[in-house]
Amino acid sequence: MVDRLTINSVLFDLDGTLHDYRKASAAAMDRVYALIEQGTGCPREEQVKVYNEVLRSRTAAAFVCGRRGVGYRRERFTDLAERLRLPSMDLSGLESEYSRGLAENLTLYSDVPPTLDRLRESRVRVAIVSEGPHDAQIDTISRLGIGPFVDHIFTSGECKISKPDGLYRLAIAAMKDDPQHVLVVGDSLDRDVIPANKSGACGVLIDRSSGTQNGSATTTIFSLLQLFDGPYEFGIASC
Ligand SMILES: [Mg+2]
């Protein structure tokens, strides 16, 4: 018989775990490309190619320097305009279009609301731990409508530390929880599961694309609702 693990707190990654950030961001960029094409005639394919180069050249080091999201975005769009040789491009217009596009396309994965409901019923504490600019992640959480279900939010932008360098450890310490009673759920092995396990918590990989266990030692789920079928007892343990 498998020992059941009492869980006091569940820490979720945000982008790719609770909502499809890539899809929302791609939809927002589509609007930016359309605006540039309309204004300059620069073909979309050329813009996509150059913007991908911009993204590759700009590693934001997990956003730990604490700047606002708009600063990173302005840098990327400035770089895009320079590489496309479009010096008179209205960058603030592009930023507004991107923000509107992102806001309109943010969508929770369908398993998130029932999972948060069940965790709340179990009186488990819920936190979001995310690598990104603090203001942008707070805005995303608010737009997704999940703020009332979340007890704590920790971002690399605010805490000035990346996940591999200890953001999960810092979050668990700030919540004054015993890592042995903490579950961490994220869509990245390197940035969520491994750092979580290193902090002493139990890391779980969410991989909605596979639908099967990946054969490794990592606990993998393809729906958050599978958490309730696992060897976990959700409720407050005395630690
Ligand atoms: Mg993620």
Image (cartoon, rainbow, N blue to C red):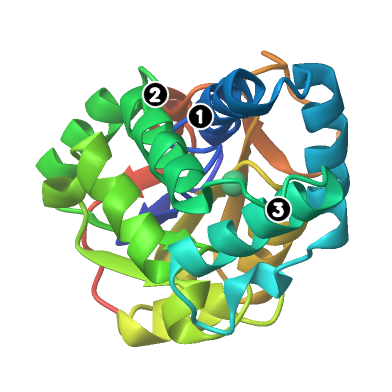
Residue most extreme to the top: 211
Would residue 12 appear left or right of 119 to someone viewing this image? right
Q: Position of residue 126 (x, y in %)?
A: 28, 56
Query: 142 above or below 170?
Result: above
- Nearer the viewer's eye, disc 2 or disc 1? 1
User: Is the residue at mark 2 in contact range of ligand 1, meaning its CB lies under 8 Å from it?
Assistant: no
Residue at which label 3 appears: 87
Q: Quarter of the image containing the N terminus?
A: top right
2 and 1 marks in contact (CB < 8 Å): yes
Q: Residue at x 77, y 57 (%)?
A: 190
Q: Which mark is residue 105?
A: 2
Please name the amino acid that badge 3 sits on. Pro
Residue at which label 1 appears: 28
Please name the amino acid that badge 2 sits on. Asn
Q: Residue at x 62, y 81 (%)?
A: 166
Q: How busy is the neighbourhood of tag 1: few (under 14 within 10 Å), some, or many (20 plus)?
A: many
- Nearer the viewer's eye, disc 3 or disc 1? 3
Q: Give the secondary structure at mark 3.
A: loop
Report the Cα–Cα distance between label 3 and label 1: 22 Å
Q: Give the secondary structure at mark 1.
A: helix
Residue 85 or 54: which is nearer the viewer? 85
Query: 112 above or below 89?
Result: above
Please tell me which of labels 3 and 1 falls first in the chain: 1
2 and 3 marks in contact (CB < 8 Å): no
Q: Position of residue 10 (x, y in %)?
A: 37, 55
